[in-house]
Image: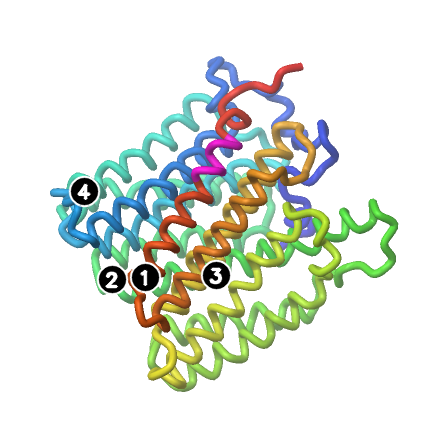
Amino acid sequence: MTAALAKPAGDGKPGTAEPAATSRRARGDQTGVFLFSQGFRPFFLAAGLLAATALPLWMLQFAGVLTLPGVPDPLAWHSHEMLFGYLGAALAGFLLTAVPNWTGRLPISGGPLMALFGLWVAGRIAMLSDAEGPVGTAVALIFLPVMAAVVWREVAAAGNRRNLPVCLLVTALAVAQVVFLLGPAETGLRLGFATAAMMILLIGGRIIPSFTTNWLKKRAATALPRPFGRGDKAVLAVSLIALAAWVAQPEWLAAGWALAAACAANLWRLARWRGAATLAEPLLLVLHLAYLWLPLGFALLALSVLTPTLVLPQQGLHALGAGGIGLMTLAVMSRASLGHSGRALTADRATTLAFGLVFLSAAVRVAADWSLDPMLLKHLAAVAWTGGFLLFLLRFVPILAQRQKP
């Protein structure tokens, strides 16, 4: 990875956060459709909308209140839409905005962006109307390989070899979706979670200390986060080995011990980034808290192997999913939306509350499996998650869909 990864979209000063490649579009594309002037606008909106609606639909189906005729297996639909639908949209919004910043190439906008977004929407419709049919499966599988091809093309065209790991991870997510839909589904699910975790470890491990360093320097702090170095590479290697073992043999004792090692390594890594010094800015603090869910998830997965009577595998998955993926994507979408629209990089009360609700949702959902009344806590977790993303939409729809007034 290149040092450019430590300069992701939206970390500049208010009014100057937009990268040069994007500003060349003069804040709007040639078709005049503002929503499709930049990749983060439609995809972040779509991710927020899916997150706020898919979980309530799943809970209504789970409770027997609602039946979707095109979804014969509600649990599989829920898992797919949150891991490949929601994450796919959040990832697309981030990469379509960040890759031009890494490569110096013009961003995808206008008609091509509309077409790419249409593929994502078609996938959501297919999963609702024909989730297990051949047509629905084929349509749902299109978006991620196309998104991977777009990222490969942009990175390769710029000769940006140091960001090839990102291309490989997007490709791995597309492969995981194929395995999930065509079988074996459990292997595809684990591969999807492992890929998402590695994305956060890799990209989050660059942006979190970078953002923290910039923020602390503005406050004349002398103690700064440790820059990316050999220790970080070692942590990534340990994490990759642990996740690969877990994907291949989730009940293997060696996988459990490897996950425990990955937990310890990532806690050490996180401790070097001075997260406690960011308490005054929730928009920055939340990135540290979101990353914390990764070692917590590794710990729970390790315990589910080493002490299966105490911890269920699904608790580790929810820590990684709702906590790590959910909170990190919400944090990055909020930050990028503010930065790329020229607004101050600070969280208001609504945004801070949204972060708190999603963090609470993850914690409650993990704890539910230890409760005497798990359904009560599951419903509470669903309400908190939905409330968090509804607040995100309430706060960011005007920012993402409308031009900022001069």
Q: Which mark is residue 164?
A: none
Magenta residues, start to end: 390-396
Q: Are marks 4 and 3 in contact (CB under 8 Å)?
A: no
The rendered magenta stretch, by its main secondary structure, is classed as helix
Q: Give me the residue at 39% from left, 74% from top.
A: 246
> How many C-alpha atoms fall within 10 Å of the one at disc 1: few (<14), some, or many (≥20)?
many
Q: Give me the residue at 63% from left, 40% from top.
A: 347
Q: Splitting the image into 4 quarters, where does residue 195 fall?
A: bottom left
315 left or right of 348? left
Q: Which residue is mark 1?
A: 189
Q: Is residue 373 above or below residue 290?
A: below
Q: Nearer the viewer, residue 259 or 308?
A: 308
Q: Are marks 1 and 2 in contact (CB under 8 Å)?
A: yes
Q: Which residue is mark 2?
A: 185
Q: Which residue is mark 4?
A: 136
Q: Earlier in the sequence, mark 4 or mark 2?
A: 4
Amino acid bearing label 2 = Ala
102 left or right of 250? right
- In this view of the protein, can residue 99 be seen by the observer? no
* Secondary element at image label 2: helix
